[in-house]
Structure formats: C-alpha cells, structure tokens
Image (cartoon, rainbow, N blue to C red):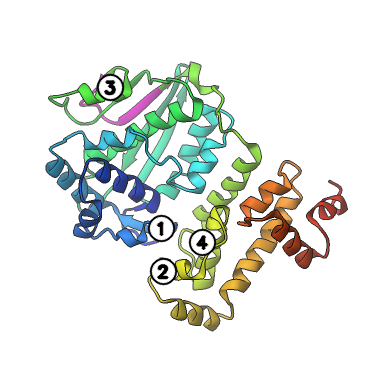
Amino acid sequence: MSKTAQLSVGWARLVFEVLQREGLDAHALFLQFDLKPDQLSNPSAYFKQDSFTRLWHEASRLSDNPAIGLTMGVQPTISAFDAYSYSLMSRATVREGLELTSRYHEVIGTAAILSNEFFAGGCRLIIDSKGDELPVAYQGFEAALALQAFSLRLVTNQAINADYVSFKTAKPKDITPYEALFQCPLKFNQPQYVMCINQKYLDTPMIFANKSMALHHEKILQKTIHELKPTTLVDQVTDLIYKTLPSGEPNIKAMASMFNISQRTFQRRLKQEGHTFLALLDSTRKELAAQYAVNPEMSLQEISFLLGFTDNSNFYRAFKRWYGCTPGDYRQLNGL
C-alpha cells in the first residue's frame, strides 16, 4: 500500500450508510470526493483519508447537522470490517475485544490509529487518525466513538456506558445528541479522543463468543497485516478468495469487477501468471480444508460454511477428491 493515509472499505461502507440515513445522495457525494462507490463490494479496497475529510464537511453542511458523525452509532452494519469485525465479535470478553481492536487496527487503514491504556480502574480506548494535506474531520472521530459505543452494547447485550468520553473539539452549542448516545459525562477541549471503560465491564462475556471462529478470523487478520498489498494478481485473487469464502462461493464475474476489468481480461491475466480462477478457488479450499479438519473445535458443518459450500454433500465430495477420504476419516487418521 502507498504511504498515502487511507481507510478501508469497511469504513467507507459505514460512512455511505450514514449519508443514506441522513437522506443525502451517498453515491453522488462519494463520486464528488473521488471515493468510488463501485469499490464498496471489494474487500481489499482502500480510500484516501483526505477525501473523507472533505466529504464529512460537505455532508454536515448539506444535512445542517454538525453532529452527523454520531449517526454511525445508530444501527450500523457491525460486520462492515469483515474478518476484523467477526474476530472481534467472536472474542470471549470485552477485554479481549479491546485488545484485538488495538492489535489489528492497521486493517482499518493506514490513517487509523487505535490504542488501549489499561489501568486499575479500567481501560482508555484512544482514537486517532492522520490525513495527508488536511487535518482529519472531527466528524470522523465522533463517528468512530459512536460506533464503539454501539458495538459495546451490541456484543454484550448490556446497556454499557463509558465512565466518560472526551473530545478534542470545543463544546458544541447543542450537546443533546451527544448525551443521548453516550449517556455518560462528556469532556471537550481535551488532548485526545478517548472512551474510558470501567473495569467492571472488561470481563463481561460477549454474546457471540466462538473460539474456533475467533481463531479462524484472526488468521485472516494476521495474513492481511503481513500482505496488505499482494504484488501479483494471483496473490490478490487468492487473498480475496480467502476473505470472501465464508460469504459463499466467489463468482468469477464479481471477482473481475473488483479489479475494474472485464472477465475476459481477468482470465487472460491469470493465465499469464500460470493459473485459472477455478484452480485458485479449488487449491485455496483444499489448503483451508486440511487446516480446519485437524481443528477438533470446528464442526464439519462450520468447515463447510467457511469454505463457501452451500451444501454439505458438495463439501464431502470435494474433500474426498482432494485427500482420498472423507473429512471424518481424515480426522481419525490425524488422531482426532
């Protein structure tokens, strides 16, 4: 990835939702500020932070809502960040979720900086961001804080309120929307954007906790961190297949569109690198199937789902073709 400060497609999707919720023409606004709406379905897409800064200011003007960022705390698509979201939601406790938030924040983009300060009374989640030519819009910071407040309540099914939330900006004329969302003391003109979470909430169990799913998605996060921009088309396609399989079998036409090229050009370029799309899909599934099959905490139904199969019988047939035995037999052969 270039040195330009960027944010991921997950963030772009959430901002797009906010604009729509405010009754604005999200598609037109994205185009106006060089943010390509057709890339919102591409899990590897990134967008310039400075473009979001310009967008936030214009959206506030058009909607006559200086607190438009807080709208992100109203029923956002919590899974917008794909593996990052799923891994976070699958953690056992709030503490584990917060630790993951800071450990893999680079997945959100080079512009995003999230860090935690654990202390005797709880945890301070510090949100920062950097642009290139422009200071980052305050609305973006408020959106991130709003998303965090919503997420904490969703994943615990509890009315968790922070001890306080701090803002770098001056106190707004109307703090009603801030009080309604955060329901805690608010501090303005502070050196950092911070949400302070009390110690009593850190060991709260997450209602979507699933150890095998957490491990699966963390592997994807680790891969993403180390390969934020693969160098060849084959690497990029393999990476996309890996990320999108849990959503169903990838479609070659949809995959080609993610690279803004025709299906014919997509196939030709893969062939030039000595591969075909179907061969990459099959080899990726084969590799993952073996990894998952030796994990005793993953059911065969879960494995079938994670590999993008809509029918378990198709998964069993594919596994037998790959390894000459059923997944259950493979587990027995490996002493499981």
Query: How far, Cα to Cα, is label 3 from label 2?
Result: 42 Å
Q: Which range of residues does the magenta coloring cover?
A: 186-196
Mark-to-mark CA distance, 2 and 1: 9 Å
Q: Nearer the viewer, residue 172 or 207?
A: 207
Neighbour tally class for label 2: few under 14, some 14-19, many 20 plus, Cα within 10 Å:
some
Q: How crowded is mark 4: few (under 14 residues within 10 Å), some or many (20 or more)?
A: some
Q: Which amino acid does label 4 sit on?
A: Leu
Amino acid type assigned to the residue bearing label 3 in the image:
Ala
Quarter-of-image position of residue 211: top right
| Image marks 4 and 3: residues in contact by CB distance under 8 Å | no
Q: Which amino acid does label 2 sit on?
A: Ser
Mark 4 or mark 2, earlier in chain: 4
Circle 4 residue: 240
Specify the quadrant that holds the N terminus. Answer: bottom left
Q: Can the viewer see residue 132 in this picture?
A: no
Residue 253 colored in magenta in the image: no
Q: Is mark 2 on a helix, strand or loop?
A: helix
- Residue of label 1: 41
Marked residue nearer the N-terminal end (4 or 3): 3
User: Mark 3 or mark 2: which comes first in sequence?
Assistant: 3
Q: Position of residue 186 (x, y in %)?
A: 27, 20
Measure how far apart labels 4 and 3 are at the Cα level: 39 Å
Q: Mark 2 points at which residue?
A: 257
Q: Which residue is drawn at 38% across and 52% down?
A: 8
> What residue sits 46% from the left and 43% below the top?
79
Residue 177 seen by the camera:
yes
| Residues under numbered marks 2 and 1 in contact, where contact means CB atoms less than 8 Å apart | yes
User: What is the number of the mark on residue 180?
Assistant: 3
In 3D space, how far apart are the residues under numbered discs 3 and 1 (Cα atoms)? 33 Å
Percent from the top left, x then y, of residue 54? Answer: 19, 50
